[in-house]
Amino acid sequence: MKNKIKIANAGGFWGDDLNALKRQLEYGDLDYISIDYLAEITMSILQKQKSRNSKLGYVTDFIDQIDDVAELLKEKSVKLLVNAGGINPLQCGREVINILNKKNIKLKVAIVEGDNITDELDNMYPNSADFRNLETGADFENIKDKIQSANIYLGVLPLLKALENDADIIIAGRVTDTSITMAPMIYEFGWKLNDWDKLAAGLVAGHVIECGAQSTGGNYTDWHKIENWENFAYPIVEVFPDGTFYSTKHENTGGLVNIDTMREQILYEMGDPAFYISPDVVVDFSTIQLEEVEKNRVKVFGIKGAPSTKTFKVSMAYEDGYKAVSSIIISGGNAIEKAKVFENLFWKRLNIDFVKSNTEFVGFNSCHQNLVQQNTSNEVLLRFSVYDYDKAKISEFGKSVAPVILSGPQGVAVTSGRPRPQTVMTYWPALIPKDIISSNVKILDNSGNITESFEIGSLTGFEQDIDFKKSKKQESTTLNSNIEFDFAKEKTHKLKFVDMCIARSGDKGDTANIGLIARNNTVYQFIKEYISADFIKNMFSDFCKGKVIRFELDNLLALNFLLEESLDGGGTKSLMIDAQGKTYAAALLNQTIDVPKNVYESLVN
């Protein structure tokens, strides 16, 4: 058994830096590299590709990366785990082998299948699984005939089997983002599948690095502290047998790793921190302990886990109408006033009722609406968008934008051609019992033929139901824009949130999360008492149509807010320019509030 392994990440989404993999291999020694390519909606895109061409359905960029680094993988004996297989892991594996053969490089390739249940839904529903929407509770019956893709988030079990068979490159379809980092730890250290605290540590390590450069200074609140943007680092975790790990990066690379970059990434896309659920373990993020031991090196320890669940999460996508987006640029004096004239004349001339329509003033308030501080702008990108089930209505919208530029105020230019209707794919999360699912691992030879195949059951024998009663949360109850603090009679100072906190926001379906992290304990005690769920609900009332839920993480001096129904349906269904709530943290940090004297002094002394 090794006494330490080093696992790097070289990408957090399909479209990330294609050179990151080569840099990770060139700049230092590693044992493993994981790359996460897949988002929920990506699966339906890959499914459509495969339906048109049976040899597609995987992440083609990955093949280019292998062509670029095959020699380095062999030379440095680094194993690679990816979910680039998408809908077609077998073809992806064969394309990798073609590259290796051309270079006369021998590396063992394994693929993982079993996550794609699109063709099995009729056999499973309703007798084995009801596929009720995990977020809304909606009935699957209403959309079952529109499903385009359905993929299970598999865990570590098939990845472990591939490692046990000495695979050098493991290509999976839909597995959890964290499992491709966890599997090497379990394999190398011989962790048992009910060693919950160690598995929890492995999951947190995977969560820290799964989004690529976000844990090495990307999207960091204190971005001005970054000294080298050009050669930006991707993350590395050094893991020990007891589950303790260190988050770091290669020397002589850009970016930054400190407690704050770590806290921001840990809070990213967070739900209930006491119940971070994966198919392998349930983790209590309120137990994570951080210690900055030296520059660009943070120790992570103390993490607690609980038994895994009896179900897998299923990510589905279904056809759900059409949308289109178009825009014009408006410049010069009185740009906002002119933009509002165009807004009014456009919708009145079009005179069509859509299921949803939206107007945004990009450059003025499209991302933050009533939270903006400015009153003027020299130029505005006026963005129109519509959604409907009637494709003809969407087409009529596309014809109507350009004509307004010659019959409205001056200083206007068209920024795009006539938009065409786009099919909307809506995300549908559900659960399925583990005991009806199996995956398989296939080993490929140098000709791309399957030499060995292993069927993997999904149950470890340790699965349990989850009791959510211990979760502490606060929910918004009212809209009241005149919220007052009870320290108002004391001597106060005005501060922006960014002076007191760092923050990061993300999305899960139609819910956005904002992780608000205090710069010191005095600030934390202040925000814990006064920045309530109601406070955030009122601040984000333009966006948030549902309730706000607040969770406390004393260990990270942080509050996590979930803003339900705040992304206009989320994903591709949303008409918002920021359909994933990525800018919500920046909006909050830019707001000014009164704070008591002790909070102010804790920051300036």
Image (tube, rainbow, N blue to C red):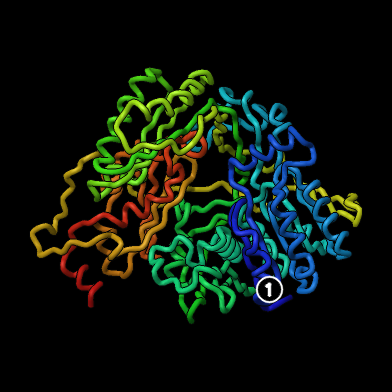
Q: Position of residue 275 (x, y in %)?
A: 49, 53
Q: Write down the residue under mark 1.
A: 26
Instruction: Determine whether 310 is above or below 127 in the image.
Output: below
Question: Residue pushed farthest bottom?
Answer: 294
Q: Is 178 in front, or is 446?
A: 446
Query: Which residue is depicted at the point 48% across and 80% down?
Result: 295
Q: Secondary structure at mark 1?
A: helix
For residue 567, which quarter of the picture?
top left
| Quadrant housing the N terminus | bottom right
Q: Is residue 115 visible?
A: yes
Query: Which residue is depicted at the point 59% across and 39% down?
Result: 431
For residue 51, which quarter of the picture?
top right
| Quadrant housing the C terminus | bottom left
Numbered disc total? 1
Q: Is 259 in front, or is 365?
A: 365
Query: Which residue is depicted at the point 13% across and 63% down?
Result: 492
Instruction: Determine whether 505 is above or below 500 in the image.
Output: above
Query: Which class describes the residues within 10 Å of circle 1: few (<14), some (14-19), or many (20+)?
Result: some
Question: Residue pushed farthest left?
Answer: 489
For residue 225, which quarter of the picture?
bottom left
Q: Is 540 in front, or is 2?
A: 540
Instruction: Determine whether 303 is above or below 481 in the image.
Output: below
Q: Position of residue 286 (x, y in %)?
A: 44, 61
Q: Position of residue 317 (x, y in %)?
A: 60, 34
Does residue 321 appear to the left or right of 450 in the view shown?
A: left
Q: Is 148 in front, or is 467?
A: 148
Does residue 110 appear to the left or right of 579 in the view shown?
A: right
Q: Position of residue 469 (x, y in %)?
A: 43, 48
Instruction: Give the residue type at disc 1.
Output: Glu
Does residue 48 appear to the left or right of 269 in the view shown?
A: right
Q: Is residue 555 visible?
A: no
